[in-house]
Image (cartoon, rainbow, N blue to C red):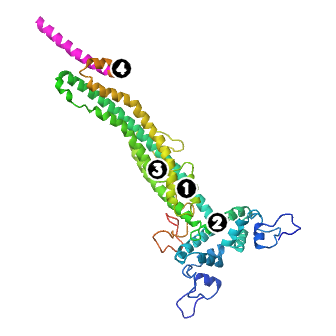
Amino acid sequence: MASSSYSNSPCAACKFLRRKCLPGCIFSPYFPPEEPQKFANVHKIFGASNVSKLLNEILPHQREDAVNSLAYEAEARLKDPVYGCVGAISVLQRQVIRLQKELDATNANLMRFTGNEVTSLPVFPGEGDIANPVYGRRMDHNYGFSLPYASPWNNNPSGDGPEEGGDGSM
Amino acid sequence: MTLKGGTSQACAACKYQRRKCKVECELKPFFPPDNPEMFRNAHKLFGVSNIRKLLREVDPAQWVDAMRSITCQADIRDKFPVHGCCGVINQLQLQLRLAEEELYAVLAQIAFFRQQSNQQNEIESVHDSASQLQALSLFHQEATPSQHQHQPPVNALPMASHQAYPNCNNVVAYNNSGYLDKDNVVNSFWVQNSYNGDNNNNNNQMAMQSVSSSHLNIQQEPAQEYDEMHPFFDTIDDRQSYIDSKDAYDSSSDSSLKDTTQSVDHIADNELKSAAASFSLTSVN
């Protein structure tokens, strides 16, 4: 309920929870009253108390990003209760692996030409010396992080427990 | 809570909540007691009650997949407290974009090399045909008219121009992966449609639309080369039928063709002159 002593209307969280929106409300900067659905989704999936604890554990300048990512994940989970946003990760990961294989095959094909060419060779901007074909930004399948589990959608049904690296699978 | 004298252990969820783990505990299969961290992360992000609610909304046959995605999402959030799964998705999209750019660059290089080698082959084949043409012309000067039925290997020349076309097919074959889209439409399409079941079909359709346009661009270059070479080949083909017809030869407007035949005539004239010289010398003696 909006207090008459405050000029600002209560945030979407306090409106949803039907409580007084205090000045130090942790939700108010990130859940404006114009976006009620945003908090409703987050609360339905994660719960207000969990979100509050999460926000308190991270730095203030990072909280907006955290809230937006939570809102995205909540919406994804509502649209797909089984896989949520993890389904998108799985799809993207498979695509990356396939594209990497295709890139490897194409580079191998290029090697056949560069192995025969000894005269002047084209120099493509940013590609460096053509004699050393650019395998370039060789993608590490870990992508800078380790996915904890093998993909639950591969043929391995016993993919529980944390595994090292996303080596082509989740 | 561990049962005294019993072999069954409480699941990690009931252990955390310090309550008796019943036989029908729905979380028991998914939170083994030897992995408390998994439950801790899931509980921190979702909470036990929310997890139970989610399972109730899902068909029991899909509980395994649902729980795996929940635990995976929770673990990712534990590793990346700020961005969570969104950070992973953004990173993967970036990787895809970089790989696509690299693939485009490599394919362009291959197309360039193929074009170079094809041009070289065409030049070599044209030289070969010109030398063969000279040899045939000399042969026809000495042979009887009935031997004119010989088929020159010039027919191979037009085929040389078609060697440019397989390049396009190979490029298209590489492009059929369904990834390449310079406008990154496919990337955004993946994320938008990640909740549908027909991701690959839509992606392939959109990718093929962009591929077909690039295919047309690539295909135009060999066609231009073919048009430039075609008149020359036509002239050579006509030349074969003109060997016995000086009138047809005179009407030809191709200067290079005239040069070729002029050189042939020059050789014939030299032979006549040498024959005449030998005759005159003979006559003096």
Disc 4 to disc 2, C-alpha distance: 75 Å
Q: Mark 2 is on which residue type?
A: Glu
* N-term-proximal mark, 1 vs 4: 1
The residue depicted at 36 percent of the width and 32 percent of the height is: B123
**Under tag 1, what secondary structure?**
helix
Q: Are marks 2 and 1 on the same chain?
A: no
The amino acid marked with disc number 3 is Asn
Marks 4 & 2 on one chain: no
The mark that comes first in sequence, 3 or 4, is 3
- Give the total number of marks visible in the rendering: 4
Residue A88 lies within the magenta run: no
- Residue B202 vs B128, above or below: the answer is below
**Badge 4 sits on which subunit?**
B
- Residues indicated by labels 1 and 3 sit on the same polypeptide chain: yes
Q: Nearer the viewer, residue B124 or B211?
A: B211
Which residue is disc 1 drawn over? B95
Can you identify the residue that label 3 sits on? B175
Mark closest to the chain's N terminus, 1 or 3:
1
Query: Where is residue B75 shown, x and y percent of the image?
Result: 60, 70
SS at mark 2 in the image: helix
**Residue B214 seen:** yes
**At 55% from the left edge and 78% from the top edge, which residue is drawn?**
B30
Q: Which residues are magenta?
A: B258-285
The alpha-carbon separation of the residues under discs 1 and 3 comes to 18 Å
Work out which quarter of the rendered image holds the N terminus of chain A and state it.
bottom right
Q: What residue did someone put label 2 on?
A: A75
| Secondary structure of residue under mark 3 | helix
Q: Chain of mark 1?
A: B
| Quadrant assignment, res B248 | top left
